[in-house]
Amino acid sequence: MRFDTAADLFIKEHETTWRNLKHVQQWRNTLETYAFPVLGSMNVSEIEQSHVLRVLAPIWKTKTETAVRVRGRIEQIMDWSTAHGHRSGPNPARWRGQLQHILANPDKVAPVQHHPAVPYGELPAFYQALAAVKGESSRALRFLILTASRSGEVRGMRWGELDSTTGVWSVPPDRMKSKKLHRVPLPTQALQLLQAQPRGDDDDYVFVSNRGGMLSDMAFTATMRRHYPDAVPHGFRSTFRDWAGECTHYARDAVELCLAHTIDTKTEAAYRRGDMLEKRAVIMQEWADYAAPAQLVLAAP
């Protein structure tokens, strides 16, 4: 079987498990641009490490992040080919114990660039300035800060996900990076923001764009650019994590679960069945009290 054929079959078998169509297109684009010119017409049983290096070496230092993804995608396609009986032997694209001894460590070639964030010491003043800004984007961004959530989770939030009795927001799996239901204990300030929003039907968005649909990601980005151009919305999760680490003594696992991060090891995960909701409620309320004094929450309707 040719490599490009194997790649196409692999993508078709797995695309329903991937989060969105953009991810599928990224797979196809990177393989067509970088892998197919070298490997596309080759039989998967004939591909060796030297061929994989011909794909990776030219871009390893200049397009490191892309090269790392291409290597991983080639590895998965080759594993798929082996599992389906089209080839045998070691995977020529494997990193551990193999290519790691030939190619430079990607973290040293191109260190990971973290999302620029508002320092936690500056957050109360930033929140105060944001509270004075009118508009749906400002209110949604404040809710994002108070809950340490991701943009897509907040923008896609519907009224039916909120339990007004318990004060818990249940984010469905299809909007979570982990693909697992995530319960968010809402601090008083976040509940007050929601109470000020016009209540729609269960399927209606909580924060609505001017056109009546879901807010765009650019709505958050534009708000940040106007008021703190050196940071991005996703950076508030880092702000929260820095605050928790520097200013509190809460257990690391509880803080990580506030961010919906997975537990480090499978062994820990096997024994941890709960989501520490009550402990997280205390953390999130203290975070909200730090970031947003009550008198700032309902400003700028």
Image (cartoon, helix red, strand yellow):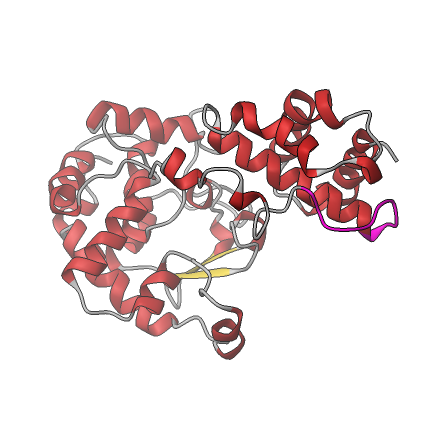
For the C terminus, the quadrant is top left
- Residue 135 belongs to magenta span: no
- Residue 87 belongs to magenta span: yes
**Residue at 51%, 51% in the rendered image:** 176
Left or right, 273 with reference to 190: right
For the N terminus, the quadrant is top right
Left or right, 83 with reference to 272: right
Q: Could one spot residue 204 in this view of the protein?
A: yes
Specify the quadrant of the image occupied by residue 189.
bottom left
Q: Main secondary structure of the magenta part?
A: loop
Left or right, 295 with reference to 250: left
Q: Nearer the viewer, residue 176 or 285?
A: 176
Q: Position of residue 273 (x, y in %)?
A: 50, 76
Magenta residues (range): 83-92
**Residue at 81%, 49% in the rendered image:** 82
Q: Position of residue 28 (x, y in %)?
A: 69, 28
Number of marks: 0
**Residue at 67%, 43% in the rendered image:** 75
Q: Could one spot residue 185 in this view of the protein?
A: no
**Residue at 37%, 39% in the rendered image:** 108
Q: Nearer the viewer, residue 73 or 96?
A: 96
Q: Position of residue 57 (x, y in %)?
A: 56, 28
Specify the quadrant of the image occupied by residue 76.
top right
Q: Position of residue 49 (x, y in %)?
A: 68, 38
Left or right, 119 with reference to 206: left
Above or below, 262 against 273 in this view is: above
Above or below, 236 against 4 in this view is: below
